[in-house]
Image: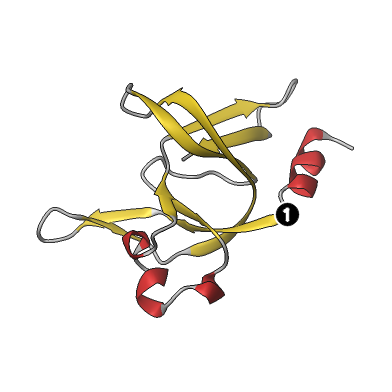
Amino acid sequence: MGLQEFISSVCVQTAVYWAPGTRDGFGQPTWSVGVEIACRWDDTTELIINKYGKEIASQARLLVTQDINAEGYLYLGSLSGLSTPQKSNPKLVSTAYPVQRIEKNPEFKSTTKFVRTVYL
């Protein structure tokens, strides 16, 4: 079993991911409608350096099988557990967390396959 197959096999949890959109007329961020992604979500607290270079405590560490944007949000659960307004606005979901850091490392001897770790 290759590394990608292993990662896919352990990513058995469902998360909702909201990618960042454009700014509204008041300069506030917007998000795309949430989509379900496969992940391995570990509730663990650890100190990380966030995307702004500040040391913070991360709430969770995830393995994901696709690229995630650093301005996005993630929620452990499925779309069916969210109301219609929540599906398009992660700020309405109390347990949706902003992405704080992303690590994307190539597999050994590969330029096209990556291991993606996301910190919330």
Name the spot of residue 94 as percent of width and height, x first: 39, 59
Q: Is residue 94 shown above or below 45?
A: below
Residue found at the far bottom of this picture: 84
Name the secondary structure under disc 1: loop
Horizontal side of 73 relative to 35 (left or right) equals: left
Residue 31 in picture, x, y percent from top left: 33, 59
In the picture of the structure, the residue carrying the numbered disc 1 is 12
Q: Residue at x 84, y 35 (%)?
A: 2
Residue at 54 percent across and 43 percent down: it is 67
Q: Where on the picture, by quarter, is residue 52?
A: top left
Q: Which residue sits at x=36%, y=44%?
A: 71
The residue positioned 46% from the left and 24% from the top of the image is: 47
Residue furthest out toward the left: 26
Count of picture labels: 1
Q: Is residue 46 left or right of residue 112?
A: left
Of the pair 49 and 36, the residue shown nearer to us: 49
Q: How is the image coloured?
A: secondary structure
* Depth order, front residue of 112/27: 27
The amino acid on which the numbered mark 1 sits, given as a three-letter code, is: Val
Q: Is residue 35 above or below residue 82?
A: above
Quarter of the image with the N terminus in it:
top right
Pick whichever, 21 or 84, lies toward us: 84
- Where is residue 48 drawn, in percent x and y? 45, 24
Q: Is residue 61 left or right of residue 10?
A: left
Check the image and name the residue furthest to the right. Answer: 1
Q: Is residue 38 left or right of residue 89?
A: right
Q: Residues within 10 Å of mark 1 (few under 14, many from 20)?
A: few
| Residue 6 place in picture, x, y as percent | 81, 40
